[in-house]
Amino acid sequence: TLAERAPRAVRVMDPFHVVAWATDALDIERRASWNRARRQAEGRDGRETARALKDSRFALWKNEADLTDRQAAKLTWIAATDPRLHRAWRLKEALRAVFTLAKTRPTAALKALDRWIGWARRCRIDAFVDLQRRVRRHYEAIRAALTTGMSNGLIESTNTKTRLIIRRGFGFHSADAVIALAMLTLAGNRPTLPGRQPATE
């Protein structure tokens, strides 16, 4: 196993995936909110409310700083119409803010994470109660992400670019050819190709 081969390695949870967990939990609550509104719908106004909750996905998913005026108005409407769903959105945003804070103040981010866990534990929203249990299970790896600032973003970017190289090449005769082209494209030290002038600084 990896632990046996690299016993001193520190496992770091990627921030993107932790925030994605929160987004998934929020979407579970959005669907539950929509279903509650459908069951309670009476007349045209009730159906319109249910439809508006169903169509609120993009406003809820988006980072608060990136909201358009229309999406911000949608969230204001949700706060008045369904406070429970709005609280779920605030929980998602608060967890995202923990990782933003870690970029400049890791110690404060650790305290903010602990406060978030306590809030989520008491929130009475099943999806987020389950999420805080998941966060606690992976606490040490998330803590390492907050204190080291490391993520697997660079690796995932490299994997994406490698897949693009393979697709663009329409197939290769051997793995060595794929590796050679990936190294040529992505590695920092690039040799001068035949017939080309060496780059001058």
Image (cartoon, grey):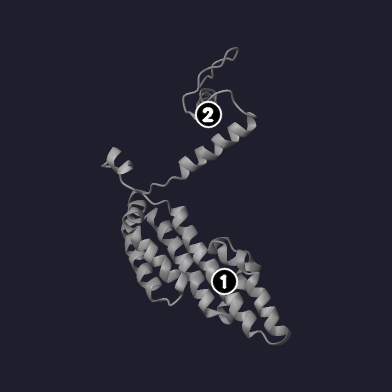
Give the farthest residue toward the left: 8
Which residue was labeled with disc 2? 182
User: Which residue is at a point 57% across and 81% down the rendered structure image?
Assistant: 80
Residue type pointed to by label 1: Arg
Q: In which quadrant of the rendered view does residue 30 lie?
A: bottom right
Do labels 1 and 2 touch, CB within 8 Å? Answer: no
- Residue 77 visible in the displayed image: no
Furthest toward the bottom, the residue is: 42
Query: Closer to the camera, 119 or 71?
Result: 119
Left or right of 111 in this view: 81: right
Q: Is residue 171 left or right of residue 20?
A: right
| Horizontal and vertical percent position of residue 121 | 37, 73
Q: Is residue 41 left or right of residue 154?
A: right
In the rendered image, which residue does mark 1 sit on? 30
Residue extending farthest to the right is 44
Q: Amino acid at mark 2?
A: Ala
SS at circle 1:
helix
Furthest-front residue in view? 1
Location of residue 55 in the rendering, given as x and y in whole percent from the top left corner: 66, 69
**Quadrant location of the N terminus in the rendered image:** top left
- Count of numbered circles on the image: 2
Q: Residue at x 62, y 85 (%)?
A: 40
